[in-house]
């Protein structure tokens, strides 16, 4: 049974204030025994508690920088929690950073294999999927060329075609529907609907509140790395809209 459990999860990044120092700054800081490039802690997520069960379609909303994509990557296992517990039961399929794993000097065909293996495919499981991936991308003979010759739109077409050729159990999605030209976007939406119908559990990050309203039965509102509200889709989206409309606040 697919499920996700987060208990008092915190995620803190330790980053340098500046990537480089000038020679003058280095000498001055050394003379006064100051840290040459002090670290700063960024609290990306704080005390997050979530339980998502099989059959649920959960949307994540919040302002830019609220921690939505960070939370999704923590669920996927990209980031381990700094503290707290993350328990995931079920195979995860994630749709973010869909161009990850591409080799610019390799052909489109070769990159289908490279990226698919990163998604957990094996040579045997991939065998029946290669041609459908190629057909969906509509790249034709361009698949015989190294991807460094592809336009940005062609690259995204191939990336999306590979990333969505999975049989999802737990599906994590981060703003991937605005890909390619208008005609390909329609195909992409249809493909996403098929994936969502097959998935046992879905977590979807989006700024498109209308889409979340139609796709999700539950929404979590993140605010500066904390869960501000977790409840029914209509309730949480309406509360968020009221918050955004408050004087002095810019729409997210």
Image: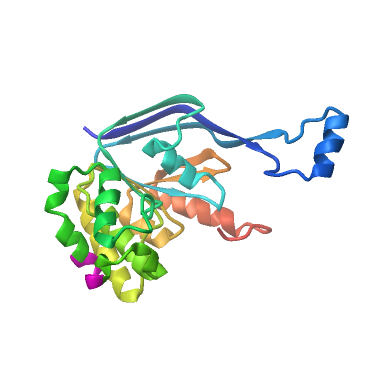
* Quadrant position of residue 111: bottom left
Residue 211 image offset from top left, x and y in percent: 37, 60
Q: Is residue 198 left or right of residue 41?
A: left
Q: Using the image as rendered, state which of residue 194 and residue 54 is in the foreground.
A: 194
Q: Is residue 186 left or right of residue 126?
A: right
**Residue at point 29%, 70% (across, down):** 186
Q: Which residue, as the protein is rendered here, is positioned at the far top?
A: 84
Residue 83 image offset from top left, x and y in percent: 50, 24
In which quadrant of the rendered image does the N terminus lie? top left
Magenta stretch secondary structure, dominant: helix
Residue 67 lies within the magenta run: no
* Quadrant position of residue 25: top right
Q: Is residue 40 left or right of residue 25?
A: left
Q: Which residues are magenta?
A: 135-141
**Residue at point 36%, 74% (across, down):** 181
Q: Using the image as rendered, state which of residue 176 and residue 47 is in the foreground.
A: 176
Eyeballing the image, is 34 above or below 245? above
Residue 93 image offset from top left, x and y in percent: 29, 44
| Total numbered badges shown on the rendered structure | 0
| Colour setup of the view | rainbow
Q: Using the image as rendered, state which of residue 199 and residue 151 is in the foreground.
A: 151
Residue 201 image offset from top left, x and y in percent: 27, 42
Q: Is residue 54 left or right of residue 71?
A: left
In which quadrant of the rendered image does the C terminus lie? bottom right
**Residue at point 58%, 60% (across, down):** 251
């Amino acid at each position: 049974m697919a499920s996700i459990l987060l208990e008092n999860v915190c995620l803190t990044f330790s980053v340098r204030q500046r990537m480089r120092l000038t020679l003058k700054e280095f000498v001055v800081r050394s003379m006064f025994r100051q840290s040459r490039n002090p670290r700063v802690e960024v609290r990306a997520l704080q005390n997050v508690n979530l339980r998502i069960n099989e059959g649920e379609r959960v949307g994540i909303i919040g302002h830019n920088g609220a921690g939505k994509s960070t939370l999704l990557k923590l669920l996927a296992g990209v980031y381990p929690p700094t503290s707290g517990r993350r328990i995931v039961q079920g195979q995860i399929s994630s749709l973010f950073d869909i161009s990850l794993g591409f080799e610019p000097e390799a052909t489109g065909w070769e990159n289908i294999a490279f990226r698919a293996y990163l998604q957990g495919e094996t040579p045997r499981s991939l065998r029946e999927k290669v041609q459908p991936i190629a057909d969906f991308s509509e790249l034709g003979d361009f698949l015989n060329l190294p991807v460094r010759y592809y336009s940005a739109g062609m690259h995204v077409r191939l990336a999306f075609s590979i990333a969505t050729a999975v049989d999802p159990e737990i599906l994590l999605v981060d703003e991937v529907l605005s890909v390619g030209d208008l005609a390909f976007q329609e195909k992409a939406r249809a493909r996403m609907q098929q994936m969502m119908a097959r998935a046992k559990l879905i977590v979807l990050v989006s700024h498109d509140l209308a889409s979340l309203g139609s796709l999700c039965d539950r929404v979590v509102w993140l605010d500066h790395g904390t869960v501000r509200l977790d409840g029914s889709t209509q309730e949480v989206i309406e509360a968020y809209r009221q918050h955004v409309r408050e004087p002095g606040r810019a729409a997210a």
